[in-house]
Image: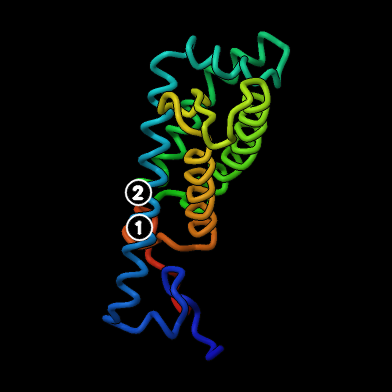
Amino acid sequence: MNGVAPRDGVAPEVAGAGSWRANAFALGAVAARWLLGGLFVYTGLEKAADPVAFLKLVRQYDLVQSAYLLNAIAGALPWFEVFCGLLLVTGVAVRGAAAALVGVLIPFTAVVWHRALVLQAARGIPFCAVKFNCGCGTGEVFICGKLLENFALVLLGVWLIAGCGRKWSWRYSVIPPAAGK
């Protein structure tokens, strides 16, 4: 490398002043941040609006036996998603919020996949024909579409964890970078 630090997560050779590629990259990263954050705000609020229904959906996975833990998950998880989503939308703690959401998405996707396999075996239908309310806040979904969506969301989150999406972030517009960096 030429010793120049990346700017806004863009490689130095792409980050030329006024470069259309650098601007497109930065805009794409901001769009990813807003998309991921907005989606989690929306789905978190959908779950929080009816915590009893969300509790029933969490119970269907049979992961936790304690009523206390089930209630805690149903009560806290939606607001955690809203909080992390708001952090992404506003550009505060982007990498940490993205890491937290990826940390939720990966095990959730594995659990949904397992539940879909159980339903497929019980119903004797093709895997992609399995449709159920997975508790994601969007109602009944076909499993193949949901798994692809979650995979794309994980990729967006990993991209943000890598340091992209800093443009138009509240933190970087309020706190000037340190001199010499």
Query: Which residue occupies 71% across, 18% down?
Result: 64
Toward the right, the furthest residue is: 65
Query: Which residue occupies 45% across, 63% down?
Result: 164
Task: Give left or right: position of 97 versus 122.
Answer: left
Badge 2: residue crowd in 10 Å (few <14, some 14–19, many ≥20): many
Position of residue 57 measured from the top left corner of the image (x, y, whole percent): 55, 17
Three-letter code, disc 2: Trp
Image quadrant assignment for residue 17: bottom left
Q: How many marks?
A: 2
Image quadrant assignment for residue 62: top right
Query: Mark 1 = which residue?
Result: 30
Position of residue 133 measured from the top left corner of the image (x, y, whole percent): 49, 23
Query: Mark 2 = which residue?
Result: 34
Q: Is residue 38 above or below residue 131?
A: below
Q: Secondary structure at mark 2?
A: helix
Q: Is residue 171 above or below residue 2?
A: above
Q: Foreground: 165 or 4?
A: 165
Query: Which residue occupies 47% across, 44% down?
Result: 149
Circles 2 and 1: CB distance less than 8 Å?
A: yes
Q: Is residue 126 above or below residue 165?
A: above
Toward the bottom, the furthest residue is: 2
Which disc number belongs to residue 59?
Answer: none
Task: Give left or right: position of 112 versus 136.
Answer: right
Q: Foreground: 76 or 179?
A: 76
Q: CA–CA distance between discs 2 and 1? A: 6 Å
Three-letter code, disc 1: Val
Q: Is residue 9 above or below residue 59?
A: below
Badge 1: residue crowd in 10 Å (few <14, some 14–19, many ≥20): many
Query: Which residue occupies 41% across, 30% down?
Result: 43
Q: Secondary structure at mark 1?
A: helix
Position of residue 89 measured from the top left corner of the image (x, y, whole percent): 36, 46
